[in-house]
Amino acid sequence: MSDVITFKPRDQLNAEQQVKEYIAFAQNLRGFDKENAPLDWGAVNWSFWIKSLAFSKLGANVRSKSFGPGDVLEPQIIDFAKSYCIHQQTLNRTSEVVQVVAVRLVEKALLDLGYAADITLVDGGVMDRAAEICDDRLVHKSEDRAYRCGQQLQALSKFLDDNKFTVRPVHWTNPIPRPNDAEGHRKREDDRKKKMPDPVVLNALAEIWVANPQEHRDIFATSNSVILLSAPGRVDELNKLAKDCVVWKENTKGEEELFLNWYGQKGFGFSDKPVPKTFQPFCLEAIERIKAITEGPRRLARILEENPDEFPIHDECPKVSQDETLMHEQILAAMCLEGTQGTPRNSVKIWLDQTLKILDKRNDCKASAAILKEALEGMYAGKPSPGKQDRLTLTLRKLNVFIREYWLPSTFPFTTESKTVKCEHALNCYYSYQFEKKFKAKLFSIEAQDNNKLNSALTPAAGARNKGLNIFERWGYEGKGFGLTTHQFRHYLNTLAAKGNVGEVERARWSSRLDLSQNKTYNHETTQEKLDRVVSIGMGSQNKNLAELSAKNEPISLKDLGGSEDRISHTTLFGKCEHDFAVEPCPKFRACLGCSKHKCIKGDDEKLRRIKFKKEALRINLEKAQKGVDEGSFGADKWLQDTMQDYERACELVNILEDPEVPDGSVIACRDDGFTEVTKALTARGKLEISGGQLPAPEKAKPGFDKDKLRKLLGR
């Protein structure tokens, strides 16, 4: 998939021909072919090759194993849908194939408007209708989901325009507004309740953890929950966590701190996530508990990888050669079957028959189907009688073909398709059926842990409870909705970090998040909690903390500066500004030291250093201006006069800020010269009215400065 050839439209072709060229191009993309099972272009359901992808109509059950004629995309558009999905997924693989949703919406819009389901007929009106369908609450009950589908429609529209696939240009943008997430909004409050875990449920989980559960499924659920509570991660990322993920680093105080080497999805990659000190012992204990129940599966993973042509000999497996014909009892032992269907022979026959029915529906298990079919055909029909004998054909080597085609994950020897961590090195590596109570663990195979495994153990969903999967129900915790989801841990830790004044960059990095703007989605502080946090850093209290707040560039309100308005001041190079930029731009053009709206705060050493630097720059300008006046340069006298005023103000300001009798935190207002750039221009043109009259424009430049004052300022 690394050698991707981008499709390039040909200018001389019309829209219909362009689409045909594109489909031919996409049919040659081989990035999703599997060994001995190339992608079947004619299939409606591509879930075997690309997760959860089926080319069904909008509203059809996409999880269905078979689709009726009325559930499949129209013949005129289905090949384009397949081409668009495989092309975009080849360029950028995602966990959810969102492109197919956009095509489904467009097909529905075309049919609603009386058109054929032809992608070349798409225009702005069709896209508008698709957006209406998308924004229908009956289709997408979530505003966020509707907005994101609208964004996919916009991406499809741009793609059609860029490649000239339509008769008329589309030129369309998503009209569905981004969901309102303003603070205090009722929906925001509802989101907070839904996305944050219930403290009662968290306490119940802690009680189960402290009880030191012994069942493997309970160890799996509680220990992985502790890891997700140690550092904010996604449940998928647990599959990429190595058994030796623990990292110790020495901080600036010489103390050892615990980190987890973590692989963040969505392009973040590997990073070391810090674990809060209070949670370190629990995190280490959780990792050790998981290691204790996964040593065997990791050892099996190594054997399977190093011996691809041999059946792995496990504790229950008969100790025979790989090519020796197996008896019925040996087959049951090798495959970890209970053998409860009467005699061992009858149990094997039923197992072969049931397994073949499953294999017949799969395209990737043809070799296994042939092996098992041969074994079943070798078993005589009817009741046992003298002279009847089975023709035994199964060997360990033949069963090895079956377990590798049918039992092992398609990503083996890696835990996921990203090929980040091998199963033999993964912390979460388990036998197939290791958590089942009705079946024996399959000691010859390992199992990939998908998102549902951990969520099913924690979820309040009725389906999980009815199947006995919910850990809280098994441990006697009752109540409707008693449970949580793994993603709630991520929201919970991000909110705690925000309450603890952890910075935006640090929170994003801790969460393996590239987009800092997403931090607010995971911060569920209440309005009161945010207000309390603002007060705790000094806002709303007068006044000794102002110097510290100014030095840290923390927010300072106008009331703290002596103003009457309830808003935050602007930070400048030298202090704080009271100007309201929502009303007009800065009338001084950032000449802060000559503006009464600018306030300096005593005790901020960095701001004082900058004012001194500005003072020195003004002194140099004074000398240049004086030289210009001495040489008779035009305008130099005005420049000198203005610079003298600026330098004098800077000197006065430095003297006040360095005065030991002035307490730290004092607010010093700059002295205003009464002019802005606008008033200066009006004065120069004689248009500024003062006390009912006008200032006449000067006839010629005159020295308007005091030479003695200048010498004093320059120390001469």
Image (cartoon, grey):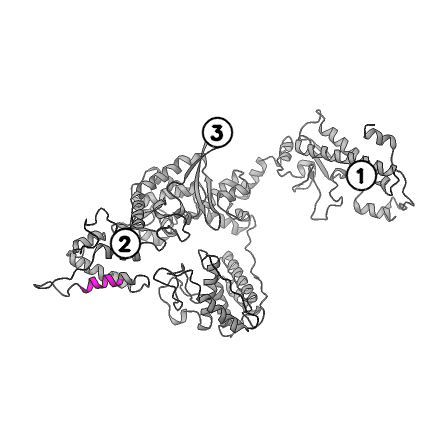
| Magenta stretch: dominant secondary structure | helix
Q: Nearer the viewer, mark 2 or mark 1?
A: 2
Q: Which residues are magenta?
A: 369-380
Q: Nearer the viewer, mark 3 or mark 2?
A: 2
Q: Nearer the viewer, residue 28 or 209?
A: 28
| Image location of residue 704, percent across then percent down | 88, 38
Q: Earlier in the sequence, mark 3 or mark 2?
A: 3
Distance of label 3 from label 2 (alpha carbons) = 52 Å
Distance of label 2 from label 1 (alpha carbons) = 90 Å
Give the numbered dot on residue 673: 1
Q: Residue at x 81, y 35 (%)?
A: 622
Binning the other alpha carbons within 10 Å of mark 3 as few (below 14), some (14 to 19) or many (20 upward) gives few
| Image location of residue 331, percent across then percent down | 20, 55
Binning the other alpha carbons within 10 Å of mark 2 as few (below 14), some (14 to 19) or many (20 upward) gives some
Give the numbered dot on residue 309: 2
Question: In this rendering, would 563 be left or right of 101?
Answer: right
Quickly name the residue at label 3. 254
The kind of residue tagged 2 is: Asp
| Image location of residue 692, percent across then percent down | 88, 46
